[in-house]
Structure formats: structure tokens, C-alpha cells
Image: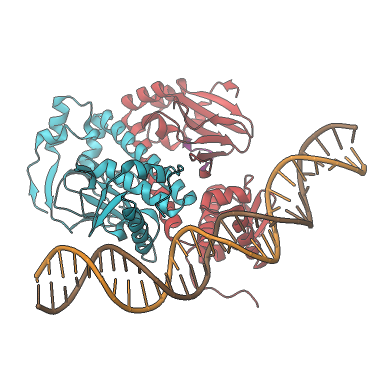
Chain colours: A cyan, B red, C brown, D orange
Amino acid sequence: MTPLAPDPDVLRGLRLFAGLDAAALAETVRSAQTQRVEKGATIFSQGDPATLCHALIDGRVKIVQTGADGQQMVVRYIGPGEMFGTAAVFAGGVYPADALAVADCVAIHWSAAAMGVLMERHPRVAMNALDIVGRRLQEVQTRLREVSTERVERRVAHALLRLARQAGRRVEGGVEIDFPLSRQDIAEMTGTTLHTVSRILSGWEAQGIVEGGRQQVTIRRPHALVAIAEDLPRPLPPA
Amino acid sequence: MTPLAPDPDVLRGLRLFAGLDAAALAETVRSAQTQRVEKGATIFSQGDPATLCHALIDGRVKIVQTGADGQQMVVRYIGPGEMFGTAAVFAGGVYPADALAVADCVAIHWSAAAMGVLMERHPRVAMNALDIVGRRLQEVQTRLREVSTERVERRVAHALLRLARQAGRRVEGGVEIDFPLSRQDIAEMTGTTLHTVSRILSGWEAQGIVEGGRQQVTIRRPHALVAIAEDLPRPLPPA
DNA sequence: CGCATTTTTGATGTAGGTCAAGTGTGGTGG
DNA sequence: CCACCACACTTGACCTACATCAAAAATGCG
């Protein structure tokens, strides 16, 4: 976690600062700090006082919530350009989950106080934050409905499609999730076990829908996955 | 849905306007509209363009999300003093769920434009909204983990405790949920079926933990319910 | 090359969903 | 005021999707 001088240009891409003029952007740069985080490191831990708002510049961060009896759930993966830990700063003051770097990362952060000042001086920042958190709320509500009402296979399909959308890299003959993703991770995203995920992926692999590797998934036929996610009628696998 | 002149005092209790001075509060009052909504009426529907931010003054509103194939989930119940529909206005512009009055209600609302102006003029409003939405995000994430990792009985216990906290009325010998709540509703809050909820409540009733009625639940021994929710060791029911 | 970690796969168990009848109960209209 | 009806609730019997238990096999790293 080496602190560095922040790069002004980089803020331009953050939705949090959309609509700000150059002067205001310069102001945000001044109060920011950049850091490198190596793969495997923890950026913040569940229960810690939420003193920093983070944005990811490069890499990938896994947000994981742990229950009283140790069961874990992957809340979401953060990609470049996304904020994390910000809601906690302005709602409760305690991080409700761990943030782990699953690849080498470059991140930027603001102190709670500095971000508060920015928001008071530039309401657009607060409104952008509201937009971001609001969308995340809707996404989590949708996942909640899925976990409550859908079968495991559909949930895994939804999870992979979501990951492909936010972290998919086109490769020949498919879309590859561009960070290390184990069966256990997928299980923790969908409320099931790694065993069930493994069986499902094996089944899909036999149908040529996905291709799996160690901590690695490539979607070969996204359309077929959509059909599963939407529970559309689809051809039976060859007998 | 009769529009009325809003009552200035009533805004003082809303967390959204916490920390505003009298002049700013007067401004919020001017842009607000009050409405009566009778039990059973719909305040907004899933998919509608989100044009209004709502706050509930009196009554109870159920927020329900419907999936593609018709399965419903109760997202939350709104009580007096709470906002609803606000996140949708500033994140996506479409209501992601239905809002139904489950009792006769008095609600107040602002147009998206008016609320936008308020937030730009008074960053505190935007920051308060961020606080509210952030907390709701954390709550939904916690429910997501519960549904993903806990058994039905614990989830039902959690749901009842949550309801008791936000809508519980002390009565002799217990706490009563003060609005009509069917087994089906509880099932849709916890991702199970009304049958299973009925069996669980019957079991608890036999142990004197709760008392059920038609669309009605009273918690007789909240502590016992906490023990179930936390999965603490507890005495077996008499054989 | 050897070891730790991840993944696969089979066998078995069970929580809770589904199906199927009932049994209250409050509201309504005659 | 009563009879009826729709709707909420209960309860039993059965079934299955998925968890759990238990090994092995693959993979990549030091």
C-alpha cells in the first residue's frame, strides 16, 4: 500500500465526479491519495470504522461480507472506475464487509472529512454518489429476489452474465472473466456450494456453453446462458 | 389520492431534512404536495418512470418487486417518517417495484425536478439521502446474506424481529406487528412458501413464542425469537 | 518433483417445496 | 341478523433440488 501522488486525469473517468468543471476537479485531486495494493492484500475490513472513500483505478477488488457464524458472501466485484466503501462512510460509519484485492490494484481514496467538504461545496458529487448507491441498491434487491425465488442453475447463469458484463474480455470464441474466480467464489455469489457450482459448470461445459479452468471461466455461448437465466425453453442436450 | 396542502411541521421529523434551518425547511414545504391514499391503492408501479420522491406521514406502504415470471418479493415495509421511491428518481429513473398502501395513508411527495433543486441548493439534503439509501443498501445486503446462508426458520425469525423493531406496538404480554401481515407476506419477505411459514408459526405458537391470527402476528417472547435468529442453543420443546 | 489448492464426481441425506384437503373467519348482501 | 362466500390459514403426505459426506483427480507453484 504505497501512497503516491494522484493522477489528475484519472478522476475524469469516475462517475462520482461527472459534471464537475475543471476547477472543482482540481480540488478533488488535491484531497485525494493514490495507493498501490498488491494481490491478496486487504484494503479494509468488516467492522473497521469507515474513514476512507475509495475508487479503483486499476485491478479488481472483491467485497465480502461475513456472517456471525463465519459464512461468507461475495457482495460484489469492483472494477476500474468504480467507488467502494463510500456508502459506509456516509451511512453508519463502519465498513459492513471486507475489501480484498484479487489482482494487483491501483486505488485512490479520500478521507471522510475531505469527501464531506467536497459534497457540501459541490452538490453534484453528493448527487452522483446517490445515483451510484441507488443503482447498487437496485442491483442487490434484484439479486435478493433471484436468490429467494430462482433455482441455483438460473442464479449461477445470472451471476456469470453479470460478471461478463462488468469484467468480460472478448477472446476468440467467447468472453472470458478477466480475473481469478474460483467455484467457491461463484458459490458465495449465488448462495450455494462449490460442489453444486462445479456440477453445473461441468454440465454446461459438456454442452459447449462455457469452458472452465482453475479459477477461470470463459463463456462460449452467451446466448445459451441468457436462455438459462431467463428460463426460456431450449433444446435438450443430445441424448 | 386527494392532493392537500402540506403541513410544515411534519417535515421536521423526516431524516431527509435533518440539519436544515427554518428557511430551507420552508422551501421544502413549498415544493411538496400531500396526498391521502386509501388502503389497497397503488402509489406507484414497477416500471413506471420515477417522477416523484415520496415520504410517508402516516399509514404503512409495502414495496413489492415482481420478477419476469411473476414471483413476488416484499422488498420492505415503509412506516411514518420514511422516504420511498427516492433512490429510483436519482438512479435510473424507473421505479423498480410497486408501492402499495396496506393501510390508509397520508403521504407527501416532491417532483424529481423540485427535489433536484433542493439538493443542489442544500447539499445536506443530498447527503441525508445518501445516508438513507446507504443504510438501506447495507440492510438489503445483510438480508441477501441471510437468504443465501441461513435456514428458513432463522430467516423468518429475523424478519419478524425486523418488523417488530420498525412496526411493533407494545401490547400486554408482547409486541404486535401493527399492520395486516399475512403468512404469504412473510413468505415473500423470506424467500419461502406460505405453507412453511404457517408450519413454523404453528410450532412457535405451541411453544408460546408467538401468537398468530388472520393477517396478524404478536410476538410473545421476543427473547426466544432472538435465540432462534442467532441460532443460540435453546431448550428443547417439552416432549 | 512434491505439495497445497482447486476441482470433479459419486453416494447419501434432508429441508423444505409441492400437492391436496380441509378448517376457520370476517365481510357482505339478502 | 343470519347465511354464504371468498380468502386466509392449517395440516398431512409425498417428492426433489440441493446440501453434505467422502474420495479422487487435476493443476500450478515453490
Is residue B77 one of those drawn in magenta? yes
Q: Is residue B108 visible?
A: yes
Q: Horizontally, is C29 left or right of A102 in the view?
A: right
Q: Residue at x 22, y 50 (%)?
A: A61
Q: Horizontally, is A44 left or right of A193 in the view?
A: left
Nearest the eye: A157 or A14: A157
- Measured from the top left, where is residue A64 in percent x and y? 30, 55
Nearest the eye: B24 or A198: A198
Nearest the eye: B92 or B218: B92
Q: Is residue B185 above or below residue A182?
A: above
Q: Residue at x 49, y 62 (%)?
A: B151
Query: Which quarter of the figure is the N terminus of chain A placed in?
Result: bottom left
Q: Is residue D22 above or below residue B210?
A: below
Q: Quadrant of residue B124?
A: top left
Q: Quadrant of residue C29?
A: top right
Nearest the eye: A131 or B127: A131
Q: Which residues are magenta?
A: B76-83
- Measured from the top left, where is residue B131 in percent x and y? 36, 41
Q: Residue at x 43, y 49 (%)?
A: A236
Is residue B165 one of those drawn in magenta? no
Q: Quadrant of residue B128?
A: top left
Q: Horizontally, is B75 left or right of C22 in the view?
A: left
Q: Is residue A56 above or below residue B18?
A: below
Q: Is residue B136 visible?
A: no
Name the outermost residue toward the left. Answer: A5
- Measured from the top left, where is residue A132 in percent x and y? 31, 37
Q: Horizontally, is A32 left or right of C22 in the view?
A: left
Query: Which quarter of the figure is the C terminus of chain A placed in?
Result: bottom left
